[in-house]
Amino acid sequence: MLLQPFLHIFRYALQPVAPFTWFGLGVTSLDVVAALRLCVALRQVKDHLRLELALRRAKGEKVDEPEDRSFARDAMTTLTVVYGGEALAGKPHHPSPESLPI
């Protein structure tokens, strides 16, 4: 009885989001939140690496210049953000709300 509200919220989060269903895509709210979380994590890693590079330069260490951004690098980053979870899972699987235990 205590878990009923959480189960209903979880079931609701597994329902496809309206703008994506217009195009026949089964994107859920959890997918959108996961993509945003991955973007934030990638941004934090990038900022940390830039800070580390700046600190090493300030100490006077010889640091190689980072390579220029290439199309392949940008494309792979975009694909990781958009399809990261599906690539790890192999096939996207969202359980139907009816199959969840009550």
Image: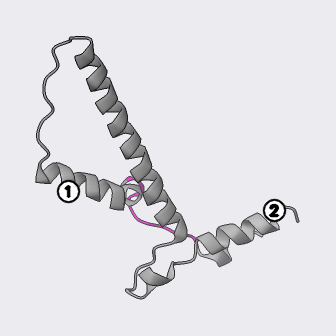
Please give left or right for residue 8 compared with residue 69 in the image: right
- Quadrant in the picture for the N terminus: bottom right
> What element does badge 1 sit on?
helix
- Quadrant in the picture for the C terminus: bottom right
**Residue 83 location (% of width, % of height):** 34, 60
Task: Say which residue appears at 79% left-offset and 68% top-offset.
Answer: 5
Q: CA distance from mark 2 to mark 1?
A: 42 Å
Magenta part mainly helix, strand or loop?
A: loop
As shown in the figure, which amino acid type bears the numbered disc 2?
A: Leu
Viewer-proximal residue, 11 or 74?
74
Viewer-proximal residue, 88 or 27?
27
Please give the range of residues in magenta: 88-95
Above or below, comparing residue 62 to residue 31 in the picture: above
Task: Say which residue appears at 23% left-offset and 18% top-offset.
Answer: 57
Residue 40 in view in this figure: yes
Task: Say which residue appears at 66% left-offset and 67% top-offset.
Answer: 10
> What element does badge 2 sit on?
loop
Residue 3: numbered disc = 2
Most extreme residue toward the right is 1
Q: Which residue is mark 1?
A: 75
**Residue 51 location (% of width, % of height):** 33, 28
Residue 100 in view in this figure: no
- Asked if the residue at tag 1 contacts the one at tag 2, i.e. Cβ–Cβ closer than 8 Å, the answer is no
**Residue 74 location (% of width, % of height):** 20, 53
As shown in the figure, which amino acid type bears the numbered disc 1?
A: Ala
Decide: few, some or many residues near mark 1? Use Cα within 10 Å; few <14, some 14-19, many ≥20: few
Magenta stretch containing residue 58, yes or no? Answer: no
Please give left or right for residue 54 compared with residue 68 in the image: right
Task: Say which residue appears at 53% left-offset and 64% top-offset.
Answer: 30
Above or below, comparing residue 24 to residue 48 in the picture: below
